[in-house]
Image (cartoon, grey):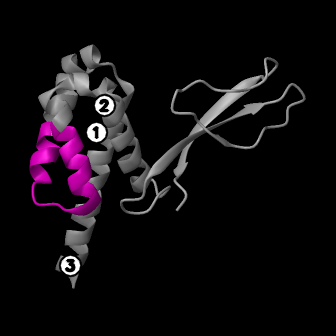
Amino acid sequence: MATVTNLAEIRKERLHVLADMLAHARIFVPGDLALDTEWRSKTHSAVEAAASEDGLAAEVRDLLKEVLANVEIVEDVGFKRRSDRALAEYDGIVGPGQDIVYKYRWQEADGTWSSWRATPRTGKLDYPDEAREIQHRIAAAPG
């Protein structure tokens, strides 16, 4: 029984490290990421350690392989969406394989918040000129 528990803990920790490496990759521009040799080394090791993983760990591992092969991919819209989806699953926002939607809301001049709205595919947000702050989030896609 202890071996099963240890294996589950090892897999959980592997997924945590992989997700951490992917989140790190998502916040950097390609030039900075390419120069981050410590990140590249740790990511390469994490990817190798997760070679036999499946499910979410495999999904994140494969996304990291793409980044290691070409750091420019972090600016690709499709890659960002796949990464956001995987990280949302890791964070418990969506279920396994479930799609995501991007949402936004704004704070009115009186301090109240609007309801959350789906971010248009164009990226152009519709909010009043007097909006004080805009927040963004990822949510589970309906259906």
Which dot, 2 or 3, sits closer to the camera? 2
Q: Nearer the viewer, residue 104 or 4?
A: 104
Q: CA distance from mark 3 to mark 1?
A: 26 Å
Residue 125: x, y in percent? 64, 26
Q: Secondary structure at mark 1?
A: helix
Residue 50 in the magenta stretch? The answer is: yes
Question: How many residues crowd around disc 3 within 10 Å: few (fewer than 14), some, or many (20 or more)?
Answer: few
Find residue 25 and name its label.
Answer: 2
Neighbour tally class for label 1: few under 14, some 14-19, many 20 plus, Cα within 10 Å: many
The Cα atoms of the two marked residues, 2 and 1, are separated by 6 Å
Residue 4 sits inside the magenta stretch: no
Look at the numbered disc 2 and give the secondary structure of its residue.
Answer: helix
**From mark 2 to mark 3, how far is it between C-alphas?**
32 Å
> Above or below — where is 56 with respect to 106?
below
* Residue 110 horizontal side relative to residue 43, left or right: right
Which residue lies under the disc numbered 1? Answer: 21
Q: Is residue 139 above or below residue 131?
A: below
The residue drawn where x is 20% and y is 55% is 58
Residue extent of the magenta highlight:
44-65
Residue 111: quarter of image: top right
Residue furthest toward the top? 31
The picture places residue 31, in percent across and down from the top left corner, at: 25, 14
Disc 2 and disc 1 in contact, CB within 8 angstroms: yes
* Amino acid identity at mark 2: Ala
Q: Residue at x 25, y 27 (%)?
A: 73
> Quarter holding the N terminus?
bottom left
Q: Specify the principal SS of the magenta part.
A: helix
Q: Amino acid at mark 3?
A: Val
Q: In the rendered image, which quarter is residue 66 located in? A: top left
The residue singled out by tag 3 in the image is: 4
